[in-house]
């Protein structure tokens, strides 16, 4: 039976209060020709039938494969305590903390999340998070546009193509000039990037490690940008930040990341969260919520929303962003994950992932016709050039239970034989060996 919470008497009272006779009267302003003739809804099912149907659909997902996919999203181990704590009702059902007197727990968690990501990326300030890594990068670009009053953005082509697609979509009606500088065998062309940054540039946008897994020090590029009064914007991989030179050390003005790798399961695409950090001079340009710590009249520590530049709080035209809802529950998961691992645990996670990746690179490049795309340093992900189509390799090995990586040609024309391989601490040496043997068997 369908669940209808209102009795006929309830409906009648509500209609009387509104001043209409029937529910249909509520739609009187919609012309008849514009109303749907039918909703083409299937017949309702019982709870048992619905569960059976959904279970059958979920069973079609491949969850039994060994996957070496990365390309921005990584299968790291998540301690069980992350699920146990983040699923507590106090956090799981909590909504926007507009009333600080009733939301101290949520506000404190967000404040500590901001503190944790600032320390991880070595930046001054952070917000409460945004939707995902791509929207964080878009917001970073718009921060640069507002701060510099310029409309030209220089973007490294080795930046995630998923992010670049989002940037092109989000800015399609904003009269911005996006200048994409081609990569060189998966590496940023530093000379071309510097040449593109001039006195009309708002920011240069890069990624470390980049989409191809290459690690780069952008200190000189950011120094060059600063000389032209442009900002340095960088997207990073949080786990690798425990062992790599930080955005703060490089002199970045804005650093963003997708928080999926710290506490979020892959979950077939989400939900994830976008991490946003910046230097103090830019804090009033950062979108979304920022939680601050203060004291009440009795001297007790308290937490409140501060520097709120969202459209709910000020005039819409003055808001820094209208698409900046924070992912508080995902941010809480990231905070718990970082706290459980601690600095040593996060470093160990990165080191194990890099160790597995180096073993995989060694095994794969020992096969005839397989070579690394470049000789630059890499973290837990690397690209190899195959003697055959990477799409064919992915199709054949996936059918046998091993996803060998990501076919780069999906986003980069002319690179159909390039395969992007990622490893995490969850991969065993045995699994890497099997991958190498299976790939060798089809080459």
Image (tube, rainbow, N blue to C red):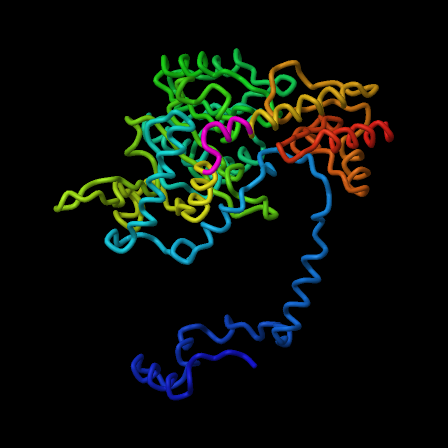
Specify whether residue 406 is in view.
no
**Quadrant of the rendered structure where residue 425 is?**
top right
The span picked out in magenta is 340-348
Q: Residue furthest bottom?
A: 9
State the image coordinates of residue 198 (x, y, percent, origin top left).
41, 15
Residue positioned 68% across, 66% down in the render: 53
Which residue appears at 59% of the width and 36% of the height? 74
The dominant secondary structure in magenta is: helix
Where residue 115 sits in the image (x, y, percent)? 35, 34
From the image, which quarter does the C terminus lie in? top right
In the image, is residue 37 above or below residue 374? below
Q: Residue at x 43, y 47 (%)?
A: 327
Residue nearest the observer in this picture, 368 or 190: 368
Which residue is located at x 62 percent, y 76 percent? 46
Q: Position of residue 234 (x, y in %)?
A: 46, 26
Q: Quadrant of residue 362?
A: top right
Q: Nearer the viewer, residue 34 or 198?
A: 198
Above or below residue 46? Residue 300 is above
Based on the displayed image, in which of its 4 quarters is residue 142 positioned?
Answer: top left
Question: How many numbered marks appear?
Answer: 0
| Left or right of 236 in this view: 303 | left
In the rendering, at what x and y percent does residue 204 appear? 45, 22
Q: Quadrant of the N terminus?
A: bottom right
In the picture, measured across the screen, residue 389 lies left or right of residue 422, that is right
Relative horizontal placement of residue 294, taking residue 254 as reference (left or right) = left
Name of the residue lying farthest toward the left: 297
Does the stretch in magenta take in 195? no
């Amino acid at each position: 039976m369908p669940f209808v919470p209102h009795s006929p008497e309830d409906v009648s009272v509500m209609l009387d209060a509104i001043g209409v006779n029937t529910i249909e009267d509520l739609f009187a302003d919609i012309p008849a020709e514009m109303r749907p003739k039918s909703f083409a809804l299937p017949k309702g099912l019982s709870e048992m039938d619905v569960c059976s149907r959904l279970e059958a659909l979920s069973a079609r997902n491949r969850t039994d494969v060994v996957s070496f996919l990365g390309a921005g999203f990584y299968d790291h181990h998540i301690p069980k305590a992350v699920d146990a704590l983040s699923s507590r009702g106090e956090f799981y059902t909590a909504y926007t903390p507009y009333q600080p007197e009733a939301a101290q727990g949520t506000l404190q968690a967000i404040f500590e999340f901001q503190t944790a990501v600032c320390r991880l990326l070595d930046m001054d300030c952070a917000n409460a998070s945004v939707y995902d890594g791509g929207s964080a990068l878009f917001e970073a670009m718009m921060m640069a546009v507002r701060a510099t009053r310029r409309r030209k953005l220089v973007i490294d082509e080795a930046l995630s193509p998923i992010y670049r697609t989002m940037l092109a979509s989000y800015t399609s009606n904003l009269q911005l000039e996006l200048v994409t500088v081609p990569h060189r065998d998966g590496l940023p062309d530093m000379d071309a990037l510097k040449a593109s940054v001039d006195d009309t540039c708002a920011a240069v946008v890069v990624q470390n490690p980049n989409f191809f897994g290459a690690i780069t020090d952008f200190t000189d590029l950011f120094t060059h940008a600063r000389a032209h009064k442009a900002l340095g914007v960088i997207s990073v991989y949080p786990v690798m930040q425990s062992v790599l030179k930080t955005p703060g050390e490089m002199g970045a003005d804005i650093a963003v990341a997708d928080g999926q790798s710290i506490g979020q399961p892959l979950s077939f695409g989400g939900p994830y969260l976008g991490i946003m950090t910046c230097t103090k001079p830019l804090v009033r340009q950062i979108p979304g919520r920022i939680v601050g710590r203060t004291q009440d009249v009795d001297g007790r520590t308290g937490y409140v929303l501060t520097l709120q530049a969202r459209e709910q709080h000020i005039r819409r035209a003055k808001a820094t962003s209208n698409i900046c809802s924070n992912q508080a529950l995902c941010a809480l998961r990231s905070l718990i994950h970082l706290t459980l691992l601690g600095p040593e645990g996060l470093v160990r996670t990165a080191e194990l992932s890099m160790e597995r990746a180096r073993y995989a690179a060694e095994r794969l490049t020992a096969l005839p016709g397989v070579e690394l795309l470049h000789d630059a340093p890499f973290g837990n992900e690397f690209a190899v050039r195959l003697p055959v189509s990477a799409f064919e390799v992915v199709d054949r090995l996936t059918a046998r239970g091993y996803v060998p990586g990501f076919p780069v040609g999906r986003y980069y024309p002319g690179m159909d034989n390039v395969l992007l391989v990622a490893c995490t601490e969850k991969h065993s040496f045995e699994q890497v060996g099997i991958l190498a043997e299976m790939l060798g068997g089809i080459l």
